Image (cartoon, coloured by chain):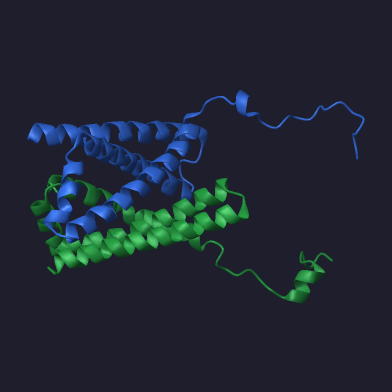
Chain colours: A green, B blue
Amino acid sequence: MASSMRTPLGRVRGHGAAHSGTSHFIAERVTAIALFFLAPWFALSATFAGVASYDAAVAFVRQPVNAVGLILLIAVAFTHMSIGMRVIVEDYIHKPATKTLLLLGNAFLCAALAAAAAFAVLRISLGA
Amino acid sequence: MAGAGRPAARPLSPHLQIWRWHVTMASSIFHRFSGVGLYLGAAGLAIWLMALASGPQAYAPAEALLTSWIGMAALYLVFASLAYHWANGVRHLLWDTGAHLNPKAASGSAWLAILFALVAPAALFAVLNLGA
């Protein structure tokens, strides 16, 4: 009796924990640590480079260090915001159909925006 | 059911209307709001990069929007959201280590994050306009 807290059904099924329950929790924090550096770097360096104008923006993205930094920022930021919006949807939307649609829309939108942004950086910096 | 005939002497669950306002509550709500603001800002970043990759003609409307009052106000709000989410994110990362996780420290750092979100965008705006 005292040797196990498991129910008889649980013991028969024999499944343990999947050991991946905290993957989103950890990913949100790892990306947060990366964004601690990447987000202010981009916001400030792009602002001071005057990237509203076409020529200044192209020159900024063409710098190899900036192109690499932008691709890192895109990969990390869109992952972070995808997880963040997922948490918001799961917290407030309880109707299964609406929730599923919003979660799908969030995942697809973040993937599409990240792909578009990364492709644009490569096209500008490689000079197509 | 036990106690079915007894008057309810148990504590009532907290009611929305009798909650005292806390700065830690506001700081938590602002974190979500600024996160949604940055979501929109990141979508703008992707659209801006695609316009830039499509050549000067495709970029012209983007430049017109970015230098207009609406575009500048939007950029100011995105920068304020970033400043807040960044500062408040540091609080969350510190709490994950178990540090500063008490009401007094949490209230103090909440005010710091709010102050930073007010000062940082204003300072950047001032530096850019004084430099010009």
Please give left or right for residue A5 compared with residue B25 in the image.
right
Q: Quadrant of residue B87?
A: top left
Q: Is residue B95 visible?
A: yes
Residue at image x 43%, y 37%?
B30
Q: Quadrant of the N terminus of chain B?
A: top right
Residue B83 vertical position relative to residue B11 in the rendered view, above or below:
below
Q: Position of residue A85 (x, y in %)?
A: 46, 51
Q: Position of residue B40 (x, y in %)?
A: 35, 47
Nearer to us in this view, B37 or B51: B51
> What is the tally of numbered marks visible in this picture?
0
Q: Quadrant of the C terminus of chain B?
A: top left
Please give left or right for residue B117 compared with residue B128 in the image.
right
Q: Position of residue B43 (x, y in %)?
A: 32, 52
Nearer to us in this view, B128 or A7: B128
Residue A20 vertical position relative to residue B38 in the rendered view, above or below:
below
Residue at image x 45%, y 56%?
A106
Residue A4 vertical position relative to residue A35 in the rendered view, above or below:
below
Nearer to us in this view, B14 or B70: B70
Q: Position of residue A45 (x, y in %)?
A: 17, 49
Residue at image x 44%, y 35%?
B27
Q: Is residue B97 visible?
A: no
Residue at image x 21%, y 56%?
B51
